[in-house]
Amino acid sequence: MKTALTELLGTELPIIMAPMFLVTNVEMMVAAGEAGIAGCIPALNFRTIEDLDKGLREIKDKNKNAIGVNLIVNKSNLQAKKQLHKCLDQGVDFFITSLGSPEEVIKEAKSHGVKVFCDVTDEKYAKKVEDLGADAIIAVNSGAGGHLGNIPASVLIPSLKSNCKIPVISAGGVGTGSGILSMLALGADGLSIGTPFIASKECGVGEDYKKACVDYGAEDIVVTTKLSGSRCTVINSPYVKKIGTDQNIIESLLNKNKQIKKYAKMLTYYKGMKALEKAAFGATYQSVWCAGTSVEFTHQVEPLIQIVHRFKNEFTEAQNQLKKILERT
């Protein structure tokens, strides 16, 4: 499993533990490093810049593997510049940018020797961030958890590999070692995997959230626009069934009005993130849990390193099965 991503980050495996809002924590970042993969944590998971500074220091003290931070780079993140500068001061290894133009992040990160990977959902945006100087592309496909793309991995990865020169990292829909092999076979240089790690021992979310990841399957994942205004996947819990997945008429009209669209989106994003925070850490009927279709392969709560070991074993088994098939043809 040596790829362009393992060369970029110096990791044993071509896997990034995807940054998950309100889910990824310091303990998970440390465990990811011990398991031989790169960890990435959203800057917004820290309430203040001081908390971000403290958290990064703790991660660096305990994790000698590659450390990444996810930055939301659109106008909804009022702390983006301060977060960027604090991360550069702390010497993070890479950034993953989401939901906006990464131009400023790429420019400043380059001057500090820090790599920048950019979330993209199509070839057009991939070419833009490549021209800006991105080091790799996070190809967010239609199977991704949280904010997802429109194009399946089977189409998106080969398309980006054919049209871009920088490494392509697949994001979405993978929860097994055989899934990892399939993405590499499509041409991916690595994977960003999130949902399988929610039900890890190190994860700090509530036990109800973890239990939901064990009990629900791929058919229970639905797409909603009520959390951030953008399409986002959640578990179809009784509460989600009750409130629905589409914005109401007022929300929809506000988001279409040119004069107030920006502020309406910011308000929707804020309300949605507060709902997620309440559900993630508290046992309540009003629960909105983010997850992707790879929740299908979560069958128990276990240490993060065991999840990665399972990936490795399944990958080897899938390789051997493929060899046998090829030998018969």
Image (cartoon, rainbow, N blue to C red):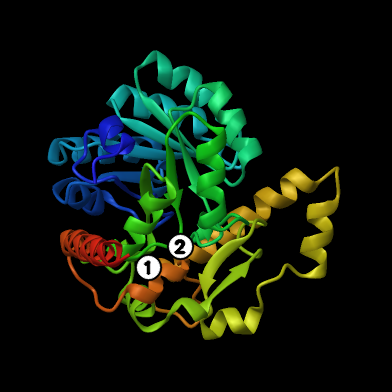
Q: Which residue is drawn at 51% across and 33% down?
A: 80
**Disc 1 residue type?**
Phe
**Residue 160 pos. (x, y %):** 54, 40
User: Circle 2 sits in a helix, a strand or a loop, which is it?
Assistant: helix
Position in image of residue 246 (x %, y %): 71, 70
Looking at the rendered structure, the kind of residue marked 2 is Glu
Count neighbours of disc 1 (C-alpha within 10 A) and say few if under 14, some if 14 to 19, many if 20 or more: some
Count of residue discs? 2
Which mark, residue 83?
none
Residue carrying label 1: 281
Q: How crowded is mark 2: few (under 14 residues within 10 Å), some or many (20 or more)?
A: some
Q: Percent from the top left, x then y, of residue 1?
A: 24, 46
CB contact under 8 Å: marks 1 and 2:
yes
Residue 324 vs 165, above or below: the answer is: below
Q: Which residue lies furthest to the front in this view?
A: 329
Question: Mark 2 sits on what residue?
Answer: 277
Residue 128 appears in the picture as rendered = yes
Residue 18 can be seen, yes or no:
no
In the rendered view, does 28 fall on the left or right side of 35?
right
117 left or right of 318 in image: right
Q: Quadrant of residue 75?
A: top right
Q: In this view, does 300 lie above or below 291?
A: below
Q: Position of residue 55 (x, y in %)?
A: 27, 41
Closer to the camera, 142 or 252? 142
Q: In which quarter of the image is residue 60?
A: top left
Q: Say left or right for 221 vs 100.
A: left
Q: Which residue is at 53% across, 32% downward?
A: 164
Which quadrant would the C terminus be assigned to in this image? bottom left
Residue 227: quarter of image: bottom right
- 3D distance between C-alphas at marks 1 and 2: 6 Å
- Residue occupying the point 48% across, 61% down: 145
Mark 1 residue element: helix
